[in-house]
Image (cartoon, helix red, strand yellow):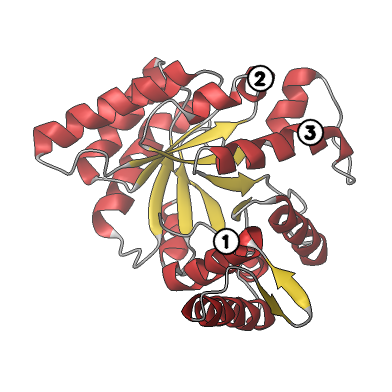
Amino acid sequence: MRPRRALLYVPGASMKMMTKAASLGVDSVCLDLEDAVALAQKEEARRLVARALAELDFGRTERGVRINEAGGDLARADLEAILPHHPDAIILPKVDSPEALRWADALLLEEETRRGWRPGGIALIALIETAMGVVRLAEIAAATPRLQALAFGAEDLMADVGGKRTPSNREVAYPRSAVAITAAAFGLQALDQVFVAYKDLDGFRAEAEEAAILGFQGKQVIHPAQAQVAHEAFAPSEEEIAHARRVLAAMREAEAKGEGVFALDGKMVDGPMIKAARRILSQIEGS
């Protein structure tokens, strides 16, 4: 699974912004056909996103597209326009049931089969941004092997439940953690909420670092400057990398001696610490 430390949203109606996004070296971009595009611009945005997928060189950046809500006519038209150009991922908004993912999975498989592409090669990312989506998290996470990540949408969720957003994030503490925990339970990535004050990079960094502590692997971003900060916040530090290497080296030395338990820096090392060390090193190998 590719790293998604930053998932950068880009309006699908702006070829200029999509061209710039392709050159940034962000882990993942989301060419947006949903919230960022007015109804009257949907058709033109589809044409531009299809053109971007066909013509722009994104390098190692994942080329994702957020379509409109699964099952609707807008979403069908979105997929008809973009699938011939093989996006890397489809981002589904407001996922509140496993059926939404299965609907998309079936259409993607049909296109992959018809064109001789690898089945399952186009990933799915589910946006959890409704009360029902939170309630049915486990069902959604298990819906299809094509699903690679759960992304948390705080703004839409609070609108759905009638709550109020605050800088403290206390009103989304439960659903935010539930997304991270469910993703971990099902072997998926967890992508944290958007930070709307895009000029406040210190605030963004603090929230991103908090998200990493909670178990998120990346963050949804709305500005290129946020993307760079997210890449840093979700990458292990040099100290963490060095410690992880020492843990695994000590583990191998203990195994060679036939010892099941060992100490490092005056602390006993157990299974969870070894697992954490392996996860840290897998991050730098995959980035």
Q: Quadrant of the N terminus?
A: bottom left
Please name the amino acid that badge 3 sits on.
Tyr
Q: Which mark is residue 66?
A: none
Q: Quadrant of residue 271?
A: bottom right
Question: Where does the image place residue 74, in percent across and percent down from the top left?
Answer: 40, 22
Residue 154 visible in image: no
Q: Secondary structure at mark 2?
A: helix
Q: Real-space Cα distance between discs 3 and 2?
A: 11 Å
Whether 267 is drawn above or below 137: the answer is below
Q: Secondary structure at mark 1?
A: helix
Earlier along the polypeptide chain: callout 2 or callout 1? 2
Earlier along the polypeptide chain: callout 3 or callout 2? 2
Please name the amino acid that badge 2 sits on.
Val
Which residue does the image show at 43% across and 32% down from the upper left? 67
Tell me the mark number nearer the camera, choosing from 3 and 1: 1
Residue 142 visible in image: yes
Q: Which residue is mark 1?
A: 275
Q: Which residue is mark 3?
A: 174
Which residue does the image show at 50% across and 73% down from the upper left? 284
Whether 116 is drawn above or below 259: the answer is above
Whether 131 is drawn above or below 261: the answer is above
Q: Which mark is residue 135?
A: 2
